[in-house]
Amino acid sequence: MRQAIRNRDRVAKRIGTAAAVVVTLAGGGAALAQETESSSEPIMTATAVAAPPAAAAPIDYIVPDLSPSRGAPRPWPSAGFVLRPSAAILGDWTSFSQDDDSVAQVGEQKDSSEWRSFRLQVLGSFGGTYRINYQLGGEYKGFDRDPDDPDDDWQLTDMSVTFPVGESTRVAVGKIKETFSYEMVGDAANLPHSERVLSPFFVSRNTGARVTHVFGPAKRVNVSYGFANDTWDIGTTTQRGTDYFGRVSGLAWDDTTNGHYLHLGASWRYAAADGKTRYKGRPGSNVSSNYVDTGDFPSDGANHYGLEGLVSWGGLSLLGEYTMADVDSPAKGDPRLSGWYLTGSWVITGEARPYDRKVGYARRVIPTSRWGAPELIIRYSDVDLDDGPVQGGRFTRIDLGVNWWATTRWKFGIDLGRTELDRMGKTGTTDTVLTRIQWVY
């Protein structure tokens, strides 16, 4: 009986994802150029039909690519329905080198090449003077997949509709992001570092409702909050209960025209539990084992708290984030788990990441030279899942990387990382080399 239910859930998930893929492919010809805001409907103009981004002088990049001017939303099949197809493809090759203690802790890590992610989606709006946004997308090897389940490669990532309320508020309903943690609020393709490290503390998507307010004529302050329940998800295999979340972010210093700004934010998430919980994560890799892992332990839920900051001065930027989980587990002494990172970036040619005021997030680099925009990256991170009787391990990691933003869509990157893991009474060392090819359509 349980096997039949699992098979039914997998079929439902695949049907939903297939529908997203078919609709995306049907959208066809227009490509997406990046805008500094994240959706086709301007939040401060809730009744306006979205306009294409201002045309820029074409750049003859040395790497062939589609013209950014083809990225405008387009009416299809009429002005009442605006459609924007989108895709993101990430390909990786990862090499590992471990000492004996590392092998004893996590097993031998195999060199691997993979399609890190293949995402297809459509987004846009429909209606007349009052317009409703929609988003529908599926992903191959997404963030929430189970790497041990070969039938879990395709997932329905996004399925939501968003309703404007006045000129500064919108309400999203469906499969959405919980607005907790800077790393998860935006897209991985926009981050300076190649992989997230605070994954033990958030989920990629959940099904529920989210309210977002943008305050001020310059849209400097963003407030979002909501709830979600994994039981409502298509093809769910978990029933933790209802999560609650909220985030406040804003620009304390705002000279984004020149790429100078200071972003600050704080977030909270209540993570429900069905009598047990588990925290686990990989050290900046999508193909490694979980280096830190508490295993299941008794819990009635947890409060997660996050602080974030990003300062940009033209091509120089510094991004930092701290996350803490207060777990309600009297049997384990109510453990407190945490993680943080600090990422420095230098875009040598001087381009700054454009700031998306509707979500409180910096987007990917847009090169202004035909030779693209090279970026140097350094990151230090620390994830600690040890507290009292809960011994999930602790790792620290340092990364040195280079990104080449070759066009508005192509990025090539290489990252050298060293992870030190304290677990099982040992300190193991793993060195990694990650190379990435990324194309965003």
Image: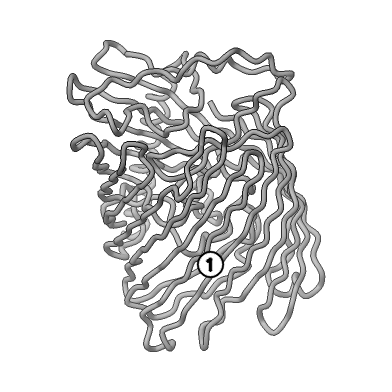
Q: Position of residue 60 (x, y in %)?
A: 68, 14
Q: Is residue 248 above or below residue 423?
A: above
Q: Residue at x 77, y 52 (%)?
A: 416
Q: How many marks?
A: 1
Q: Which residue is mark 1?
A: 280
In-image side of 110 versus 235 (left or right): right
Q: From what the image shows, is residue 341 above or below residue 93?
A: below
Considering depth in this image, is 292 or 39 the residue closer to the camera?
Answer: 39
**Residue 193 in the figure: left or right of residue 33:** right
Q: Is residue 173 above or below residue 181?
A: above
Q: Residue at x 53, y 67 (%)?
A: 280
Snapshot quadrant of residue 346: top right
Task: In the displayed orientation, state which residue is furthest to the top.
Answer: 78
Where residue 93 appears, as percent x and y from the top left, is 72, 44
Residue 231 on image: x %, y %: 28, 57
Snapshot colouring: one colour
Q: Quadrant of residue 138?
A: top left
For disc 1, the neighbor class at 10 Å (few under 14, some 14 to 19, many from 20) is some
Q: Residue at x 76, y 64 (%)?
A: 430
Question: Foreground residue, 385 or 312?
Answer: 312
- Residue 333, given in percent of the width and then of the height, sits at 43, 88
* Residue 369 position by quadrant: top right
Q: Amino acid at mark 1?
A: Lys
Relative height, residue 41 to residue 432 (above, below):
above
Q: Secondary structure at mark 1?
A: strand
Looking at the image, which residue is at 29% across and 11% down? Answer: 77
Please state, as top left, top right, bottom left or bottom right, where the N terminus lies in the image: bottom left
